[in-house]
Image (tube, rainbow, N blue to C red):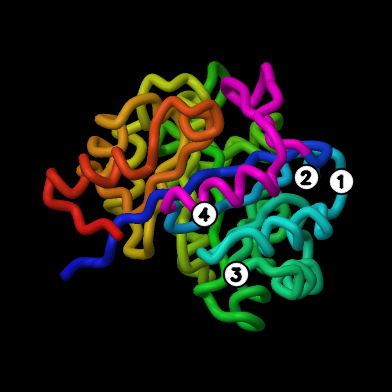
Amino acid sequence: MSVALRIIPCLDVKNGRVVKGINFTQLRDAGSPVELAGIYNEEGADELTFLDISASVEGKETMRDVVEEVAGEVFVPLTVGGGIRDVDDVRALLHAGADKVSVNTAAIADPDLITRITAEFGNQVLVLSVDARRCPPGVSTPSGYEVTTHGGTRSTGIDAIEWTKEGVARGAGEVLLNSMDADGTTDGFDLEMLRDVRQHITVPLIASGGAGKIDHFVQAAHAGADALLAASVFHFGTLRMRDIKDALAREGFNVR
């Protein structure tokens, strides 16, 4: 039987609260990360992702005390990202209860960080987070997609597909592909981007950005996603994980 498709709620945390917006802006409060983590654990989440979205932007460390509280509420794998700059940061987060870490901004500034982390802890610990968008006017890349950093606030001009390939070659065990164009819109995952990245990597690919209805999850799975990450549809009660899994099972996908 194939590996089960994973449903992953995402907690975007700023100043100790879960927030959600559109295209990384217009943030509104969605609740306590600890309370939401407990709810999602009970509702059947396969994993949970905790992203401190202000850490990289403001040059801070990830809130380890909050991570510890969240880890105490869940019995599924927990991925933590935001503000990770060196191997010691990873070690501290693993001690705080994280099972995996996600890197983005720091890895682009220092790609060898990926190599150092995976050499120390194994590639199963590292998720390469790629905040990608279609190139805006004045920016051109071979694939037509560029990577952004600092929570989507800075353009890099780096080709998103080439960077993803490099990250995997350096040891990243998974790729979290977040479409900035689709983020928070609830108009659906960026299926074209998913397919384009899927054909260039063999590690698990997590689709993120744009989920608004159950069909969007099914479409992303058909586009090659191994896991489906969403935030606002879960935070505000629009969709239930069980309903999503039932729809995926009807389409022939293996779900837990």
- Mark 1 burial class by Cα count in 10 Å: few <14, some 14-19, many 20+: few
Q: Position of residue 106 (x, y in %)?
A: 72, 54
- Under mark 4, the amino acid is Asn
Residue occupying image coordinates x 58% and y 20%: 22
Horizontal and vertical percent position of residue 155: 65, 32
| Amino acid at circle 3 | Asp
Contact? badges 1 and 2 (CB < 8 Å) = yes
Give the residue number, with chain letter if any, for mark 4: 41
Give 32 or 132, whichever is nearer the viewer: 32
On residue 31, the disc is: none
Residue at 53% x, 29% y: name it: 232
Residue 26 lies within the magenta run: yes
- Range drawn in magenta: 17-44
What's the CA distance linking mark 1 and mark 2?
5 Å
- Residue that badge 2 annotates: 56
The N terminus sits in image quarter:
bottom left
**Residues packed near mark 2 inside 10 Å, few (<14), some (14 to 19) or many (20 plus):** many
State left or right for residue 242 relative to residue 208.
left
Q: Quadrant of the C terminus?
A: bottom left
Element at badge 4?
Answer: helix
- Element carrying mark 3: loop
Q: Are marks 4 and 3 in contact (CB under 8 Å)?
A: no
Mark 4 or mark 2: whose residue is earlier in sequence: 4
In reply to whether residue 135 is colored magenta, the answer given is: no
Residue bearing mark 3: 99
**Residue 141 vs residue 242, the one in the foreground:** 242
Nearest to viewer (mark 3 / mark 2): 3
Crowding at dot 4, Cα within 10 Å, few <14 / some 14-19 / many 20+, comes out as: some
For the residues labelled 3 and 2, the Cα–Cα distance comes to 20 Å
Give the mark nearest the N terminus, 3 or 1.
1
- Residue at the disc numbered 1: 59
